Amino acid sequence: MTQRILIVTRRADIHADLVVERIAARGHRPFRLNLDEFPAAFGVDLAFAGGRWQGALTYRPGGDVLAPDDIGAVWTRKPADFAFESTDLGPQEKAYAAEETEHVLLGLLHSLDCRWMSHPAAVRAAQWKGEQLLRAARMGFRVPASLIANAPEPVHRFRAAVGGDIVFKTMASPFLGADKVEPDDCVATGVATTRITDDYLDMLDSLREVPCFFQDHIAKAYELRVTVIGDRVFAARIHSQDDARTRTDYRDFSAAIRYDAFDLPADVAQRCRDFVHSYGLTYGALDLIVTPAGDYVFLENNPGGQFLFVEQLVPELRMIDAVADYLIAGARGER
């Protein structure tokens, strides 16, 4: 019997929109749980009996009903703040409501025996950049020399030791917390990976506020975005050195640099696949550097990274279809 696909995301998510379209076009009816509508727009009726959870979630505006036993695949696509029926909850009321709602939702998700992209526990375990570097090095990747410090003196020593410029990058998010505060409280929207030249050295006293992350500046021939979906590996070459705006951080999309499909060497493709799977993940978006000498250098893996911008620039990398294929296989009973 064909089961259903649960997609956990938010309302404004074009990735989910497009995957839902592909899944529906193949005769499946996914259930979309937008967290920024949950639980306000959902009915929750779940009872534990006979050794399992019975009952259903109901999306009230459309009347769609989903029973836990009917779920064959889950895509945990995008987080969002919960929405409650009352919009005037006090701070403590809202905190309590959010804690209880998260407990209910994660308790339900963790109880499912189905195909995942990816399980919440695996996503959380995979997100720590410091641990990623250790794992990548153990699995055979070249990894840049790196430093975490909250004082200027170690940074000066690190820069002298590597014998050239270093880069500063954020570990948790490039948004500098802007996505966690109200618009009126936002003082900066983010920071790109920044090359620390002599002009920046006088600013290092600010490190005393919070530990910061630095790496050796690695010369690039080009960069790669490698997306692992199930067992499939999709690689896009990013010609970041073609424009001064993208030489340190390719994510400046005001620069119209070239992207093209890239055939990874078999051993590198397998290493990327193995790295993602080592966490129990079935999805990962890895950023690699290829040096002028042809070395592959690991930067990071994002267990929930974006892929649509790559497919838009390199249409032959059909990753929307690959996500739909993977979830549909779960609905058909593959685990």
Image (cartoon, helix red, strand yellow):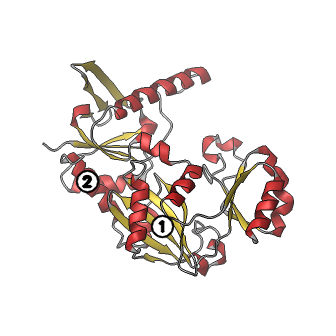
Residue to which mark 2 is pinned:
23
Q: CA distance from mark 2 to mark 1?
A: 25 Å
- Residue drawn at x 64%, y 71% is 218
Residue to which mark 1 is pinned:
225
Residue 91 image position (x, y, % from top left): 61, 24
- Residue drawn at x 34%, y 73% is 316
Q: Residues within 10 Å of mark 1 (few under 14, many from 20)?
A: many
Residue 304 is left or right of residue 20, and the answer is right
Which quadrant would the N terminus be assigned to in this image?
A: top left
Residue 52 image position (x, y, % from top left): 25, 24
Say if 23 sits above or below 266 in the image. above
- Which residue type carries mark 2? Ile
- Residue drawn at x 74%, y 45% is 210
- Residue drawn at x 42%, y 33% is 38
Q: Is the C-beta separation of discs 2 and 1 under 8 Å? A: no
Mark 1 lies on a secondary structure that is strand
Mark 2 lies on a secondary structure that is helix
Q: Residues within 10 Å of mark 2 (few under 14, many from 20)?
A: many
- Which residue type carries mark 1? Arg
Residue 21 is left or right of residue 169, and the answer is left
Residue 10 appears in view? no
